[in-house]
Image (cartoon, grey):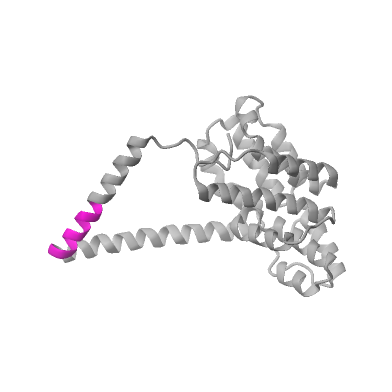
Amino acid sequence: MDPFSPGHREPRLFRWIAFVVSAALAAAALRFAWHEPMVAAFFGGAGVVALTFRWLSRRRLRRVLHSGNVHDVLRNWSSSLQRIPYPATMAPLMTATAFAAYGWIDKARAALAKAERGPAWDAALEHRLFLDTLLLTFEGDRDGALEQSKRLTRLPLHHSSRALRERVRMLRQAIAAFARAFAHRSEPGDDELLVRASENSPLVFWAMRYAAAIVAIDQGDKARVRELLAGAPAWPEESIFKAFHDEIAERARLGAAS
């Protein structure tokens, strides 16, 4: 299973029915607004409440992902991991991704070792290449990370949604820029690409920020490093991000993470 895919395509009949139902609901809303303003106000208020709740939930999740606390992230994912298709493969793979995204290399490798190999493993090639690039980079295998990121960027894009295709393409390009940053082989535009990926993909927010900080150090822009790492959490010893932050702090004369 490809973690970046939108899932199964909706049948044409289902989309047609959804369109008709939406049109009917819109017509009903207009009728209520004209003949039953109190009813319309009630449903309008309920809609606003629902949208606000959804916005607050997304904001809370983003805050958890930015916190750097991988255990909080996994707690938030726990119910989803129990319902995920092919759980014997995908649950360990997603757990490994969470650990890798926050620099917990040993935990990520241990989780990955538990993933069942089979059809779902083969279908998750895109996910695995992304994860491999993260882990090989953190383990110091720069050439291996660059090779895996190149394999990832060469994969065909089969996603039906144009917006999703662009999102996946951007994330593939960002992980390649990530590998280049740690190998000190950055290309023009990599810094902006890494920052954009950190904002669009909160799970890898800090991974992309540290890569962008390395690019900034290579460019001699210490002010940019301070901006990129503002608000960095106090990383535990288990996370390689602690070593990254300390080294970058020494080179750019930053304060310790708080």
User: In the rendered image, is residue 141 in sight?
Assistant: no
Is 194 included in the stretch rendered in magenta?
no
Percent position (x, y) of residue 135? 76, 44
Q: How many marks?
A: 0
Residue sticking out furthest to the left: 35
Residue 44: which quarter of the image?
bottom left
Closest to the observer: 103 or 2?
2
Residue sitting at 82 percent across and 41 percent down?
A: 144
Residue sitting at 33 percent across and 35 percent down?
A: 13
Q: Is residue 165 above or below residue 245?
A: above
Is 32 included in the stretch rendered in magenta?
yes
Percent position (x, y) of residue 76? 55, 49
Percent position (x, y) of residue 161? 49, 45
The region drawn magenta spans 25-35
Q: Is residue 144 left or right of residue 94?
A: right
Residue sitting at 59 percent across and 40 percent down?
A: 157
The chief SS type of the magenta part is helix
**Rendered-image quadrant of the N terminus:** top right
User: In the rendered image, is residue 168 in sight?
Assistant: yes
Residue 28: which quarter of the image?
bottom left
Percent position (x, y) of residue 24? 22, 49
Residue sitting at 36 percent across and 58 percent down?
A: 50
